[in-house]
Amino acid sequence: MAERDGDTAVSTGLDATRGMHLSKQLPYPIWSDQALGGISIMDLPMTELGNTNTLLKHFVDVITNVPPPDKNTIESLINAGKWNELPPPFCPKQKLDVKLVLQFAVLPLTNGNVCIVKHVQSPDLKLTKSVVDTLCHGTPHVLNWHGRNAYDFKKAWQWFFEQLGGWQCRCYSLSAVVPHQEKASKQGYYLSTLSEEDVDKGFAFIEQEAGNLASEWKRVQWITKNLHVNQDSPIFQWPISTVEKSIRAIQTDGVLALPVENFFFTLADLDYQILKFGVNPILKTMTTHAVGVVGGPGSGKTPLARIIALCASRFWKREQGITSPPSYREASEFDFFRGHPGRKDRPDIHDDGRLAEEPIRKMKGFTDVGCTMLTKERWGAAKFVQGQMRVFVCNDYDSTEWIEKHQNIRAGTVLQMPHEQFLEVVSPVFPKDTKLPHIMAVLKRANVLVNAGNLVIFRRASQEENRVPCLVLQTPVDYLKTEAQQRYMLYRENKLVKPASFEDDVAWEARYLDAVLHDKVLPLPNPTIINDAQHRLFHDEPRPPAHRDIEAAAPSSLPAVPSVPKAVAVKKESVTFRRALSSLQGHVIDLDSPPKKALRAGYADVKTEISDAANEPASPTSLMAAPVPPSKPSSPGSMAAPISPLKPPSQGSSMDIHDPMDDLSHEEGLENLSQELADIIDQQETD
């Protein structure tokens, strides 16, 4: 037969299904077991899936030369709805938390084995090539749409599939439309003749035009004109029920929490001290515990909550192979989360509300990440699924006497707050007169981070009444880095700024989260080394050990260096070492080669006149950048007299500089200095 050679054109299927109707997904599959049909695998309108960036909703897995399956076992599992328990190769090669619709045909071969053709559809999400490859046991193929009408091609594909014959499991069916059925549902089938592009244009037109109408009466007029009068309208002759349902959906979405995708911040924008102290344990348990961010206004609680939520969203999308953008939902009441059930890859944030005015039962349900929970709301319920990240942000807390007492402790110190004090701090978060068991039920399920002035308090989720660690900072808490604070202010002004390093920050965040979850070495931001000598120059004391680690890893978390340095005393080196350095006059020493002979000839330059600059105070920059060369008085006899001291710094300078040249007044003369310097140079040449 010619059909066996793959000569059947797609038009054959299009002509065969003209005037037919393709059903929606059937509630129960249709089974068929018959001889091979007149269509072969070569005739199917599909090609192998090569290197492509196209996102797919339909793909075909062709598995050749495998042993015959146990038909009774497979039929019983599918009829019972246990698709996940199917044996290979009927089940996906890798489990994916995405809805898949499967129909297959098993074709016998001459050697006793079979060939399996699996048609798989992902109705909710488009899949990438890499995800499709992981789902297929055999060779993945893609359907040849070639710009044809989507509905007509689906009917033709189903016809080709059914004509294969063999043992088949079908989830769709083709049926003829009798004249009275076509007349009764003419409007309903009108949409099936439109392309996907035309349908998208129609819905976009409804959203732009009908969403801004002021009254119900205006909406009735608008629908009548665009459906029955204006033939140029993108929705002309559309079913009135579809248009009315679309308008109601627009009105409903306007009062519910919708996903937010355009928040271009990552973990790389957080202060490194906060990241290490409080965010790491939050990320470690993000799949099982909720997060509470408590504290006064202006410290970056909201962006911190969004960054953590988007980090969890990106994690689940990577785990599940979902290509849609990461997002979160945010609302000031639990009621606004109704309408759309929660999703694991889309966290929910309760912010800008008052948790104390919400029933405690809703707080307990919202923070129970380990279970799928429902909260009773107006006209329905809000649903939060198991494993979904949930965050609450609250401004209500009490600054206790214990906090005021420990505000000015040395920065970098970690204190241990008594648990009774912590309960007193967070008591305004809960409804008035809430019993302790209900408070502990929430604290058992949520990690809580509190901003209390210069203190950051972090309590791990636990039912134990343990002491709570507090980190003392040098300045009031701000969770964002300086540059990220500026971008967030632009974001609040509706000026969306996507930094050039955003993709690199997302990649760094993925590595960082993987290290936290699997106890690996944490990747650090680009280090800036700030040694203790520099710190002592501008501060009266060395940095605490905790600050040394943090500064080396995240320089952006350091406080700004004061513009006017404090008074310091420069350390005095030995006279011999100082004179040797002074003779170099700023030249670079090459440690890999011996000193040049020219140095001995330049030795006489030491016996120069004392310049007027020797009587001027040296600036801190010149003192640290290059050593001051020694000078000789105008006559040998003048060495016995002490050199006049340096002039004091000008008024207003806070520097107290020690000039190494002052020590020359206590030596025996430049002759001894010259002899010592010559000995040093001779020793260097010998070495």
Image: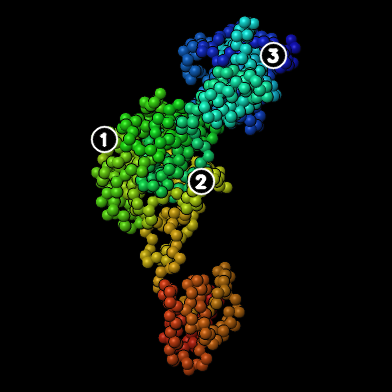
**Looking at the image, which is closer to me, 248 or 310?**
248
Spatial separation of the CA atoms under disc 3 and disc 1: 68 Å
Mark 3 vs mark 2, CA separation in Å: 56 Å
Horizontal side of 58 relative to 530 (left or right) equals right
Closer mark to the observer between disc 2 and disc 1: 2
Task: Classify 41 as above or below 512.
Answer: above
Amino acid type assigned to the residue bearing label 2 in the image: Glu
Q: Position of residue 619 (x, y in %)?
A: 48, 74
Residue 576 in view, yes or no? no
Query: Mark 1: which amino acid?
Result: Thr
How many angstroms separate mark 2 from mark 1 (CA)? 39 Å
Q: Is residue 618 left or right of residue 36?
A: left
Q: Which residue position is annotated with label 3?
A: 13
Q: Amino acid at mark 3?
A: Gly
Q: Nearer the viewer, residue 575 or 146?
A: 146
Residue topped by disc 2: 493
Graded by Cα atoms within 10 Å as few (under 14), some (14 to 19) or many (20 or more), the crowding at tag 2 reads few
Let me know if residue 19 appears in the view.
yes
Asked whether, in this view, residue 562 is left or right of residue 52, the answer is left
